[in-house]
Image (cartoon, grey):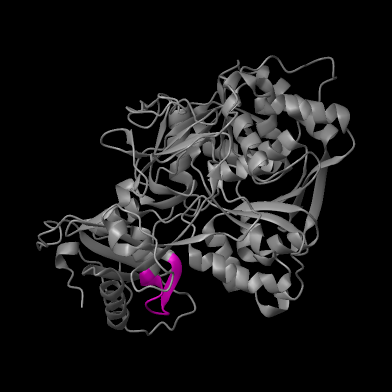
Amino acid sequence: MPQAHVAPGIPASGDVTSIASCAARLASTRTDETAYTFIDYSADLGGTATSLTWGELDGRARAVAAGLRAQMNPGERVAILAPQGLGYVTAMLGALYANVTAVPLFTPDLPGHRDRLERILADAEPSCVLTTASHQQAVEAFLDDRRLGVLCADTISSPPASAWQPGPVSASDVAYLQYTSGSTRDPVGVMITHGCLSANAAQISEALHVRPDSVTVLSWLPLFHDMGLVMTVAMPIVTGNRVFFIDPAAFLMRPVRWLRLASAHREVISAAPNFAYEYCAARIGEDDLETLDLSGVRALLNGAEPVRPATLRRFTDVFSRRGLPAEALIPAYGLAEATVYVSSAAGRTPARIVALDREELAAGQVRQVAEDAASAIALVSCGVPAGQHVAIVNPQTATVCPEGEVGEIWVNGPNVAPGYFRNPAGQVFGNTLTDAPGELPATGWLRTGDLGVLDGGELVVTGRLKDLIIVDGRNHYPQDIEATAQTAHPVIRRDRVAAFAIAADRGGEGNGGGDLVVVVAERDRRAPVGTDPVEVTRAVRGALAVRHDVRLHDFVLVDPGLVPRTSSGKISRSASRKRYLAGDFTPVGGESKTPAGRHAP
């Protein structure tokens, strides 16, 4: 039986309503109701809340749109270099109103990302820049000789209602460019159309059973990332629901702030990557825990990076004591090329963990076993797609895989982007199934580069195609090796581990069967500084041998903050591999050496 999920009732891209028209309708029907509230912790540790009604949001967005159209034409690009806050929301919505292409970015002072900002601006070539008054001087200094007009979204005077009105917007018009992380290559902008954005917001609403004015949306996610932008701006406007949000730094400094917001409201919906749930479970102490009441949480989406079963269990164990419903923690899958969202669990039962035989999975086959079996590897079901098709495809033959066989995840729907900005789509967009069953479209498929299987119609993601480590003809998923390594010794920092492969000739040895396995891990900040790295290496080596039957070529323990991450906080295995091969990692208690000069204990 072929592995494909048929989503009924997928709308044509021309049938969706634009975010701008939804916002304008809310402004006319619910003018004085509060829409967005931003809580600022920068000056007051208790937080200072500032709000906009639907009418005020519409007025400010119109002002931004009028200012933009005075300087640029529809389809030209405007870069948003603003801090997290209400000004960012009005800047983004104003760009949508004006039907110019937004490039949601960040302020030049974001640590470690100035070079990335330079490269994105060089690629996008915006005609104008939007910021806020608080950052205008810094943005203008950063732009230097680019000769770009700078508008402040929070100080533009609102024009009379009759002076400017949004023009027609086509579903195929590009709403914004969502730039990929660009950690080891030039960033690439995914072209998200108005149709893609509206469709994906509607798909999320359908999956989470969100109705108008029925939930409270909470967020700390950066608004320049796909999950933060769609969950904080687009989805609440499509459904007409109130939003409370904070700065990512405020969450990282005190993660309990996020959950205290959840405690203060009912029918709460929020989203975050896996590391945030791990972080909350580890960092929120008993005193703060006692202040929480999470019984009003409806859905906490866990996506944007691999969802770990251990994290789901740990978070549930800790916060169920404060009323968190077991079914509220919802694993999800998505990617920027599909706007953001593809599938999620239903949220009506606890997340389903699937135990598969490790040896069979290494051979590309799926066989379920008992969760406590010695050969078991635990994976998380990411539920079913909403409003789109998903197929598990053999990437070599472009045929749908038979049931029980691992293949590449392909996606087809109105949320799939038309391509990359000024960049050939390659094999990513517009692919064709060679044996499409009658209920599936034959063309227009997005290749995700992720591997998975459909189990009872539910999507189980098994790994990343390009990250596969092949040893002695067997496939190993780096996230599994990372999960084993990080629990091998208490000195290793959780979710700061990168596992990758190098060619046998680069390692100065032959293994007769493919790749050599390297693991780079950060030392936990709370671990004793004097821990012997040799002891840690032996623990990791033993754990990988027992759990995966893998011989570790090299292990490098580094100080906190040195394992490369993308701007969204994900571990970058490709950047880690590049640094390792260049000899750029300095081990704890040692000097940097080239890989050929390293001799792991």
Q: In the image, is residue 485 part of the stretch drawn in magenta?
A: yes
Q: Which residues are magenta?
A: 484-495
Is the C terminus in the top left, top right, bottom left or bottom right quadrant?
Answer: bottom left
Q: Which quadrant of the structure image shows residue 600?
A: bottom left
- Judge left or right: residue 215 versus residue 429: right
Is the N terminus in the top left, top right, bottom left or bottom right quadrant?
Answer: top left
Q: Which of 353 and 53 lies nearest the eye of the viewer?
A: 353
Q: Which of 22 and 136 lies nearest the eye of the viewer?
A: 22
391 w.r.t. 506: above or below: above
184 w.r.t. 524: above or below: above
Residue 493: % across, % down: 44, 71
576 w.r.t. 212: above or below: below
Residue 532: % across, % down: 32, 84
Residue 280: % across, % down: 61, 67
Residue 174: % across, % down: 55, 23
- Judge left or right: residue 153 versus residue 109: right
- Judge left or right: residue 78 versus residue 557: right
Q: In the image, is residue 291 part of the stretch drawn in magenta?
A: no
> From this viewpoint, which residue is outermost toward the front?
1
Whether residue 41 appears in this view of the structure is: yes
Please give the name of the residue rendered at 32% of the width and 27% of the height, measured from the top-left corner.
434
Please give the name of the residue rendered at 65% of the width and 24% of the height, measured from the top-left corner.
16
Q: Which of 531 and 112 lies nearest the eye of the viewer?
A: 531
